[in-house]
Image: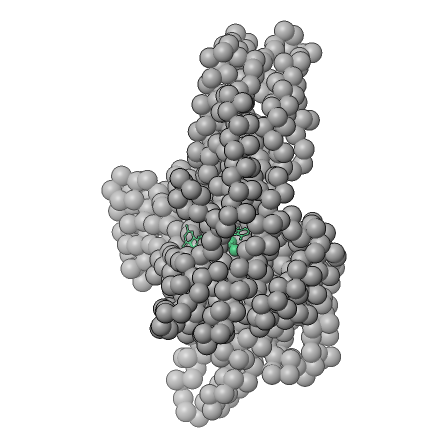
Amino acid sequence: MTVRAFGSPVEALQWLGDNAADLIITDYKMPEMNGAEFIRALRRLPHAADAPVIAITVHEERSFRLKALEAGATDFLTSPVDHHEFVTRSRNLLTLRQHQLLLARRAETLARELADSERSRERAIRDSIERLAQVIDTLPVLISAVDREGRTLFVNAFQTDFFGIDPAAVIGRTMREHMGPENAQRDHSLDRLVFSTGKALPAYEEELVSKDGERRSFLTTKTPLHSHAGAIEGVLTSSLDITANKRTEQHLRYLAHHDSLTGLPNRALLFDRLRQAITRARRGDNLFALHLIDLDGFKSINDVRGHSVGDRFLKSISAQLAEVVREKDTLARLGGDEFAILQADVGSSADAAEFAARIGQAIASFQDAELTGARATASIGIAMHPSDGDDAEEILRNADLAMYKAKAEGGNVFCLFASDMQTRARAAATLDTALRHAIDHDEFVLHYQPQVAIGTREIVAVEALLRWNRPGHGLVSPGAFLPYAEENGLIIPINEWVIRAAAEQAKAWQMQGLPAFRVAVNVSPVQFRKRNVPLFIARTLGETGLEPRRLELELTESIVMQDLDEVANDLREINRLGVAIAIDDFGTGYSSLSYVKKLPVQRIKIDQTFVRNMAQDPNDAAIVRAIIMLGHSLSLDVVAEGVETQRQLERLEGDGCDVAQGFFLGHPVPAAEIPRLFAWPTSGARTA
Ligand code: C2E
Ligand code: MG
Ligand code: MG
């Protein structure tokens, strides 16, 4: 192999004007032009139009990567480049390139031979088919096709080898028993999807197990095979082995999310976890606390004994902290001598304070035998959700303020953000009384947000969202009071009111003759834990006379995970009543479709965080696409939440998403405004 290096992009472009390259590697930041401009220029050269290009960036920001991607980069490496990673990636791309060239050459010969003479035409065609079959057999890609009944039309050698099957035995029969039941079922549903839509499916990733029990990752595409008359005769499936790529990708992701010294999660991962925790708490399930920990006196260890001793000390401290946290907590290093702990499932600020005291204790009592005398104490700042912040940034900022206060008090202490615990307790008590008052005085209202079928733009459902019309405070959102209501148990009467009010409203719309759209109601984990939801729903349906198909319950993954079998029973009963079930905020919890499969669920709602970022972040876009695809393979309807722009809607449409909900399609509005959305007269509308 020949390697050529160029000092400037201009020189490289000159050379590429006359010569071909199998792999091009470029820096992003260069003197005359940046990497994106360079790639764009070389894509215009006939010799380099389709050669793979790796761009090396020092920028973690996605915008650079996006620019390079748009210009046509194939892959990325982050500087400083890891040797091992560089070699695997280059090797993958070079192999792919070889196949590309091989296919192109065969196609060329074929074309030449066909043109050669009329006389040899028939033979050439026969040969070409044989040759093509050979090519297909030599490609390291699983290739097969099936007809409408799932019978194998053809399968290449790589695939029969991989599964250890005899080709003669599967032609004309189904091959599914060789793929494992789970893959076979998905495969079957996706084939059916291609037959029914007549369209190719976007590429998706899947794992397959070889005859030797080895698990490998594949990038799979499915396309329709047409007969001469244009009818769909079969579905062609091809799966490229991307196991090596996946491993480097996982390694990269690990690097991007972990601190290299201690191996702990870094700031980026902590932020992700914080956001997830906030989403879960929105429904009033889990309160949590963020502890920011800054070591007092670490600087002197570093200065006096040198950096390697300092590093060692930090590692020991992180091991010490790891002993204090539980599995569901997140311990992160934010940089320098700053750590953070996200403490999950906190009952009250007293719990958080007790935990902080233990952290302080663990650090103060630590002494490394080999680093005689090296000791530290910690200043700890605590912020809680929801009382000390609504979003990750605010919570972190307030924990930081509390930490500075602890430092200012001389260190070796912890401070709660709302330093005056009495004020905090008083606020909680006031809220408690106010909530009880609210229940008795009908201060709650429901707003309804439309869910729109992407294909037809018809409203197929509305989601009931709770608002508290609190005297002196205006309309309060659920995030501000449901977590408390969960804590003191008031969530039960509140949510029972929600279900009843939504059902009454739905009945009123039914009576007005509005089309039969569903009304979706969010249920709380606490309600489910009480195990009387099916009964309550049955009673509500009976008392209101609402058609069951007009009602839907939205529950989160956390409800489901708590007690899979018991919850599954309850859900089956609810289904039996004719009421549909949706999994809300999908992707923020365990996100496992394997449990969804075990449940009587009709719909999944992709959480808004993925939808929001899908236009900028290829990862999120891929997650959205995968959820849609896998949802469909389980015959579930897929709803995207938080759609705010035309662009997001178009992308979702392209990915085959069924239903969308979000500000772009309609904000939550009072019940009286809903009939208007159906071009229905509003007079006579009754609000619940
Ligand atoms: P959710 O069930 O995921 O509801 C969607 C939330 O996203 C709503 O917030 C809605 O107003 C908001 N949203 C809708 N479209 C967009 C958009 O395009 N952009 C953005 N940024 N936001 C959008 P809301 O009404 O504040 O409700 C928050 C959460 O509170 C709900 O999340 C749900 O988990 C919970 N919740 C609401 N009502 C009830 C209820 O009656 N009972 C229970 N247990 N929980 C409820
Ligand atoms: Mg919801
Ligand atoms: Mg949601």
Please state if 171 lies on the left or on the right of 472 as rendered: right
Q: Residue 612: horizontal and vertical position, in percent? A: 42, 52
Residue 171 percent coordinates (x, y): 68, 81
Q: Is residue 22 above or below residue 276?
A: below
Task: Answer with left or right where residue 315 lies relative to residue 91.
Answer: right
The image position of residue 403, as x and y in percent, is 49, 21
User: Looking at the image, which is closer to me, 176 or 601?
Assistant: 601
Residue at the image point whose x is 51% and y is 67% from the top:
506
Q: How is the image coloured?
A: one colour
Q: Which residue does the image show at 66% across and 60% down from the upper left?
A: 536
Residue 685 placement (x, y as % from top left): 41, 67
Q: Residue furthest left?
A: 32
Specify the quadrant of the image occupied by residue 180.
bottom right
- In the rendered image, the residue lying farthest to the bottom is 119
Q: Residue at x 44, y 47 (%)?
A: 469
Quick check: 589 above or below 257? below
